[in-house]
Amino acid sequence: MLGIRDSQQFQKYIVSLGPSSLLILFALIYSLISLVNHYLFRTYALDLGLYTQALYDYRLGEFNDSLCFKEEAENLLADHFDLYLPLFSPLSWLFGSYTLLLVQISALLQGGLGVYRFFESQSKSIAFWAMFWYLSFYGVFAAVSFDYHSNVVASCVVPWIFLAFQKNKVWKAFLLFCFFLIAKENMALWGFFLALGWTGLYWKNLKLRFLGIGLAIFSLVYFVSITFIVMASLSNSGGYHHFHYSVLGQGPVEAIQFLLTNPIDGLRLLFVNHLEDPGFDGFKWELHLFLVASGILLLFRKPLFLLMLIPIFAQKLYHDNVSMWGIGSQYSIEFAPVLAIGIFSVIHNVKPSKWQRFLIFIVMAGTFITSFRSMDRTKMWTNKERLRVYSSAHYSRSFNVKRIYQELEKIPDGAPVSAQTSLLPHLALREDIFQFPLIHHATYIALLPPEDHYPLNRNEWEEKLHSILNSGEWDLISDFPEIMIFKKR
């Protein structure tokens, strides 16, 4: 076994590798996860395909009509008020269907660098380990393994806002906060709690205190205005689409009333299965155990960081969709910046140094264990092949990938296409693309029989295929076990 002196020397050696080595290492790991998944058709219509088609529209100066996944046209901003996509759209001329995945990887690396910069002036050792923790956090791996989402990019801005507060740079903090807000409407609700936390952390600095209060008010006004006025006006229904918290009530007002009048029940619902299916038991506890192993209990020494996480716990654990509760997809990314800075702020204040090194070892071990656990065995089902960068199965499929790319070349660039979910992101940079079984005015249909048939089950998919084959309206121009392509007569 390593002795204390050996352990100290090992930690010093790791730190000596520097932040650049970490960034290069994790750029490689994230790329092997995300870009390989895309190449091997493990990305999907929702959400990478939808957002990639939005890039096509935005770069032409047009709004997206959501027909990719909806029966009737509706401005995509009514679904999520995401202004990152117009900003990133010119990059799609260079990077094609990989654009948003590359943006996401770059943002995660920048987030890690922001964590390092926050601690750099205090302790380069703490800065290194905080950055290492952030880049290794299970929620980061989960996010990079599943398509692209703008809340991931927004979360990576948070460490830089922390840094702007630390450096007393008011205008920089304000501009970064504005950039953070425009990712999605729900970022503004999180931003309100973040700003309250910054207000408390820098209360003794009058300028930063007023900045924090101002950002909190600005964020709340932005959230209400965008969600209930702007998005409602863009929506076909005249309302907001994403209130899915029936356990709290029928709308935001009822939800707030419930939580204020039933605080004990509100707390209990963060831990128990509130849906009827007992098969969902334990999913919330798995999340809590992952967070405990990652070091969240240290934040009780600095509870303002826990305050910052209140809306993240709420939007996950009160949701009607059980997939939100767990450790998978992009639904844990918001924990990463707050935990990284909060946990290592606590550790930095621990004396003597031997206890500091001990806590670093504990939280680093915890985040490694939870990340590998998420790739190996979880209570909630996740697609492990998307994550297991160390497994040969991650780099192969049961079908002929090369043939699929060859057959897709038969589809003209400008043709309207209805495509199965795993094919759609690769065909999305065009004016009209629809997630099968939506066909609308498509002149081509592209199907991937061995793959996920969402939103249909297998029987429904086969019935739809049978209907197309017997309609007399389509010619089958590619017929392989891997891929079927139809052209309208």
Image: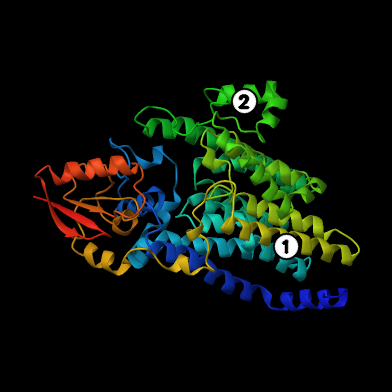
Find disc 2 in the rendering and name its residue: 256
Query: At 55% from the left edge and 55% from the top edge, which residue is drawn?
Result: 142
Q: Residue 450 sits in which quadrant?
A: bottom left
- Vertical relation: 429 (above or below) 268: below
Quadrant containing the N terminus in the rendered view:
bottom right
Does 373 sit left or right of 483 as displayed? right
Q: Position of residue 468 (x, y in %)?
A: 17, 44
Q: Is residue 192 visible?
A: no
Residue 365 is labelled as 1
Residue lying at the far right of the rendered structure: 352
Does 338 sit left or right of 380 as displayed? right
Query: At 54% from the left edge and 41% from the top edge, which residue is drawn?
Result: 324
- Vertical relation: 317 (above or below) 89: above
Pick whichever, 59 or 276, lies toward us. Answer: 276
Query: At 66% from the left edge and 35% from the top edge, which residue is drawn?
Result: 270
Type of amino acid under label 1: Ala
Does 382 sit left or right of 194 as displayed? left
Residue 53 is labelled as none
Q: Position of residue 332 (x, y in %)?
A: 59, 49
Q: Position of residue 43 (x, y in %)?
A: 40, 56
SS at mark 2?
helix
Q: Residue 358 sits in which quadrant?
A: bottom right
Between the C-alphas of marks 1 and 2, the distance is 38 Å
Pick whichever, 27 or 449, lies toward us. Answer: 449
- Vertical relation: 301 (above or below) 366: above
Q: Residues within 10 Å of mark 1 (few under 14, many from 20)?
A: some
SS at mark 1?
helix
Type of amino acid under label 2: Ile
Task: Name the N-terminal-most of marks 1 and 2.
Answer: 2
Q: Residues within 10 Å of mark 2 (few under 14, many from 20)?
A: few
Does 463 sit left or right of 9 as displayed? left
Query: Which is more foreground, mark 1 or mark 2?
Result: 1
